Amino acid sequence: MEQTSLFGEVRSARNQVAVAFVPDFAGWQAAARAQWQAGTPPEAIWWQPDRQAMAGGETDGSAPRVPRAFVSLARTAACHRSADRWALLYQLLWRLTHGERHLLELSGDPQVARVNAYAKAVRRDIHKMKAFVRFRAVAEPDAPDDAPRYVAWFEPEHFIVEKASGFFRRRFANMRWSILTPYRCAHYEGASAGGVWFSPGTDKSAAPEGDVLEDAWRTYYRSIFNPARVKISAMRSEMPVKYWKNMPEAHLIPQLLREADRRVEVMQEQVKDRDVMRCGPRPISPEAEHAHALARSPANTLDRLALQARTCCNCPLGEKATQTVFGEGPRTARVMIVGEQPGDSEDLAGRPFVGPAGQLLDRALAQAGIDRAALYLTNAVKHFKFEPRGKRRLHARPDDAEVFACKPWLDNEIELVEPTLIVAMGATAGRVLLGRPVQVTRERGMIVSHGDRRILLTVHPSYLLRLPDAQVAKRATAQFSRDLAQARAWL
Ligand code: URA
């Protein structure tokens, strides 16, 4: 019940002030701002949607400060069809600006829950409109290019035409189109003719009933309809029956559903008769590949030993190194050369003695008249130990625990190759092979027996690379070569 107060204001029976406003988000926003500035609490306002209303009234320029999320939520919820949405939005605005700034985080609050539900329903309706609008081509006698106008009829649940129109403008930018609905119609005259414009709603008789495109729609739909994947309840919820009447392809649905079982049977029959499509071999993981290779490798071979060493975790060095660097060379080699541990290049290449120290060794071997290919080359430790320094990895000497954790691999290599001479290069190799600390500079160049092994101790090529004096380095390298030359007699 409404009545006129002594001062000419329209008041409801509950003595509320009637606030007339244009019923869209901008209209409500202007009116709400004026009421908020006047300090009018929510319970004192009677919201009166009125298309002819004047803008919000006098304001002093200050605006309520609300979280940005509220503006966007309110803009969406304002499209809901429920009449109470305007009062609800003002109640939220009031609470947000009167001590409840974090109100929207309380999803259990009844007003917050209601506004969220409204926004969700609106978003869903927009989604449906995007999915189910079907344009029909209509000849336009005055069109400059003879191109038709595309016209669609759609019945949204909420007031979403304006909000959804941006999608159609972008998607159908090169067409002239109109979307007719009972409350509002949207029209677009092509990219060169400005934006979307709106006119009042109309009824369905204004929309065309069918056109040549409809056969195309039906053919397309029939071809993508998969009878083996029919889920009727999911289909009904995604494409509610109320939209079917405006979608040409929807008339096929009952028939396609009736035929679905029979079509699945036919498909299954056809598959039986046809060659099943084959694809290439499935890639297997490195772990599985390793396991297969191990299972195939014969016992007591260097290959098997190398495969086993790949997953060695006797010490922690393998965790940081790129890979295990196992020995290489013929099993029949008479001479075995043992270094300390792979360096940076070996760690990356997965092969021993390929970096600077390896190249020096190659030169010294060549000088000694020894063919590297005739030797078995390996290291006391099979993983690179290093200290990171910026982008570089600096060699770090392996400690006793690491050296002896790796010893079983070296012992197995020696057992399989059975070399007549082992050349130990450097203190680490000497210690592990002779079972005691060695003084390389004093003991080098002598062949000693250790059990049934003959061992020639010499310097490590890295030591030669580190010598600062070129003349000293030259002499030491020549002596290294002479040490190695002793091995020639054992080949
Ligand atoms: N130093 C070694 O002891 N071994 C290698 O493989 C490379 C450098």
Image (spheres, rainbow, N blue to C red):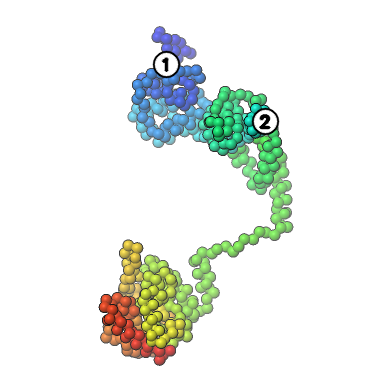
* Mark 2 nearby-residue class (10 Å; few <14, some 14–19, many ≥20): few
Q: Image point 50% across, 17% down: which residue?
A: 52
Can you give x and y, in whole percent of width and height, for residue 331 in the image?
Answer: 47, 83
Q: Image point 40% across, 80% down: which residue?
A: 362
Earlier in the chain: of badge 1 and badge 2, it is 1
Work out whether residue 60 or residue 222 is closer to the camera in this orientation and state it.
60
Can you give x and y, in whole percent of width and height, for residue 8 in the image?
Answer: 42, 9
Q: In the image as oriented, which residue stretches furthest toward the top?
A: 6
Label 1 residue SS: strand
Position of 349 with respect to 461 (left or right) is right
**Residue 437 to residue 33: above or below:** below
Number of disc labels: 2
Quarter of the image where one finds residue 111? top left
Q: Image point 38% across, 66% down: which residue?
A: 320
Work out whether residue 409 or residue 354 is closer to the camera in this orientation and state it.
354
Q: Amino acid at mark 1?
A: Val
Which residue is labeled 2 in the image? Answer: 139
Label 2 residue SS: loop
| CA distance for labels 1 and 2 | 51 Å
Work out whether residue 441 or residue 416 is closer to the camera in this orientation and state it.
441
Q: Quadrant of the C terminus?
A: bottom left
Position of 265 with respect to 311 (left or right) is right
